Image (tube, helix red, strand yellow):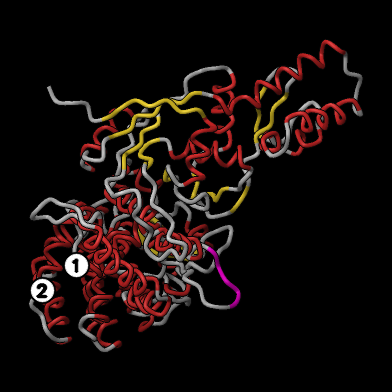
Amino acid sequence: MRATLFKEVGYSLSKLIQDIEMGEIGLPDIQRPFVWKNTKVRDLFDSMYRGFPVGYLLFWANITPHDTRQIGINNKQKVPRLLIVDGQQRLTSLYAVLKGIPVVRENYSTEPILIAFRPKDQTFAVTDAAIWKDPEYIPDISALWQTSRNRFENSFFERLRNARHVEDYEEDHISEAIDRLYDLQTYPFTVLELSATVSEQEVADVFVRINSTGTPLKQADFILTLMSVFWDIGRTQLEAFCRDARLPQTNGTSPFNYVIQPDPDQILRVSIGLGFRRARLQNVYNILRGKDLETEHFSDDKREKQFSILQKAQDYVLDLQNWHEFLKCILRAGYLGAEMIPSQLTLLYTQVLFLIGKRDFHVEGYQLRNVIARWFFMSALTSRYVGSFESVMEQDMAQLRNLKSADEFVNALDQVIQDTLTESYWSITLPNQELAVSSPRSPSMFAYYAALTLLDAKALFSQLKVHTLLDPAIRAKKSAVERHHLFPKSYLAKHNITEKRDVNQIANFALVEWSDNIGISDKSPAHYYPQYAMRYGTLELADMHYWHALPENWHEMDYETFLAERRKLIASVIRDGFATLYK
C-alpha cells in the first residue's frame, strides 16, 4: 500500500496568522484580487463563532530548502516552507479582518472587509451606514484585535450607555459575547500538509477531490504561486499592470485600452510564450521549479536561470510601447474593441508572435503590424485557438525555430495564412458553414464587422461610418449602432418562421443606427426598404448594397433564398476587407 501523500496538522487561528506574518506560510500578497463577497466572510465568522467546522486547509510543502531567498529582494527574504493550495480566500479573509488590512477587489478597487457583530443576540452582519450609527453593534470587529480587549469593551459600553440604559445582567451577557468573539483566535483549523515530493498533477487531483466547489486548478495557478514564492516582485508587477489596464488615465502613460483588460494568468501566458517559446504551461512549471527534465533533480541555480529568462520576457511584455504597438495591430485588423474579440486566447497568442517578431527577428514596424493584423484576422475568423489551443500554438511556434531573418518570419506566417484561407474556404466553408449559424458571438460575424471597418463602410441607411458607430469609447444609454433584422421577427412569424436558429441567422442582420432600427420596427422589407433607399443616389445605393451584402431585389425574395445569397456576398465582403491588410 502506498504511503499517504499528506499529514494532518492542527493549527489555531492565531498560529496561522503568526506563521503568515513570519513568512512560514506563503499567503499571496494581501494586495492581490480578493473574490469573496463580504457576506461570505460574515458567514465564515458566524460559523466559527458557533463552533461549526469550516473545512480543511490544504498546504503543500516547498521542495526548495528553507534558506532559499527570493529573487530580486534586497533584504533577501526567505521563501515560505508551506504553499497554500486550498483555503487562500478563507485565510485572506481571516488575516485581513484580524489585522485590519484592506483587500483589493476583482476590479482592483481597495476597501476594508467590514464585518459587524451585535453582542446582544450574537448576530454577524455586513456593515452598512445604518449599522455604523447603531450603538448595539460593533461596526468593525477588526478593532477588537487591534487594541486590548478591556479597553475595547469599555469603549463599546460607553457608547451603548450614551444611547440607552444597560442592565447588569445584560452587561454580563454582552461581555461574555465579546470575550467569545475575541477568543476566535484560538479557533482550531485542520491542515492537510502535502509532501514536498508530490507532483503538481497530484496536488491538482487532491484539490479537486476535497474542494467543495470542484473548481479545477490550472497550470497558471501553480506558476503564479511559484512567482509568489521565488519572484514576488515580478508577480506584483504583473498584477499592477492588469489593474492599470482597467483604469482610464487622464494624463501620463497607461496600459488602459478598449480591446482587452487582461488578467495576470493571461499576461503570464504571453511572457512564457515569448521567453520559452512554449504554449504548454505544464512543462514550463517544471522548468521554473528548477527541475532537470533528464535527471529529475531540482537545482537552485537552474531555477534562478529560468526565472531570469521569465523576468526578461515579462519586462518586454509589460513595456507600454510594445503593449500599445501590439494593440495597434488589432485595430489595423479592423477589430475595434473587446466586444468584437471572439477569443481572448487568439489575442494573446497573436501578441506572442508579435513580440517574437519584434524582439527576436527585428521585423520593421510597418511590415510587422500588417502581418500580425493578417494573422489575427485569420485566427479570429477561423477559431484557430479554440479547442486544442496549446497544441496548435506549439505547432505555430515550432515553425519559427529554424528561421533566421525578418523576411523568413513574415513569409512563414503568411504561408500559414494562405494555407488556411484557401479558395475553398472563402467560397464553400465560410458561406455554407461558418456563416450559416445564429450565434450572437460568431467569429465570422465579427470578421464581417471588421471588414466593414477596413472598407470604410457606412452603416446601413446612414451617412456615418461603421467604425465611428462601433467605437467602444462611445457610451450611451442606447447603442449607437444595432443589429437589425432585415426580415423582422414579427414579419417572419406571419410566415411561420419562428425558430431562433432561423430568425437570428447572421445573414438576417445588418448594422443600422438605433433610430432607424426603431423606425423600421416590424415592417416587411418590401415596405420599408424603398423608403430608406430614397435617401441615396445610384452610386451611393450601389455602395450600400455592396457593403451590406444585399442581393439585387433582396427585399422581394423569399427568406431562404435571401439567406443563401446574402451569405455568399458577406463572405465576399469579408474577403475584400481582409485583402486590404496586404496593402
The residue drawn where x is 31% and y is 75% is 333
The residue drawn where x is 33% and y is 36% is 215
> From what the image shows, is residue 40 above or below residue 381?
above
Residue 552 visible to an observer of this rendering: no
* Label disc, if present, on residue 277 of the rendered structure: 1
Tell me the element at label 2: loop
Return the disc, 1 or 2, that comes first in the chain's sequence.
1
Which image quadrant: the C terminus?
bottom left
- Quadrant housing residue 343: bottom left
- Taking the image as shown, residue 31 lies to the left or right of residue 557, namely right
The residue drawn where x is 28% and y is 63% is 304
Counting other residues with Cα less than 10 Å from the Cα at mark 2, is it few (<14), some (14-19), or many (20 or more)?
few
Residue 348: percent from left, percent from top = 30, 64
Residue 557: percent from left, percent from top = 26, 59
What span is colored magenta in the figure?
A: 247-251
Marks 1 & 2, CB-CB < 8 Å contact: yes
* Label disc, if present, on residue 552 of the rendered structure: none
Tell me the element at label 1: loop
Question: Badge 2 is on which residue?
Answer: 401
Who is closer to the viewer here, 579 or 504? 579
Residue 150 visible to an observer of this rendering: yes
Residue 441: percent from left, percent from top = 33, 54
Disc 1 residue type (three-letter): Arg
- Taking the image as shown, residue 508 lies to the left or right of residue 398, namely right
> From what the image shows, is residue 350 above or below residue 6?
below
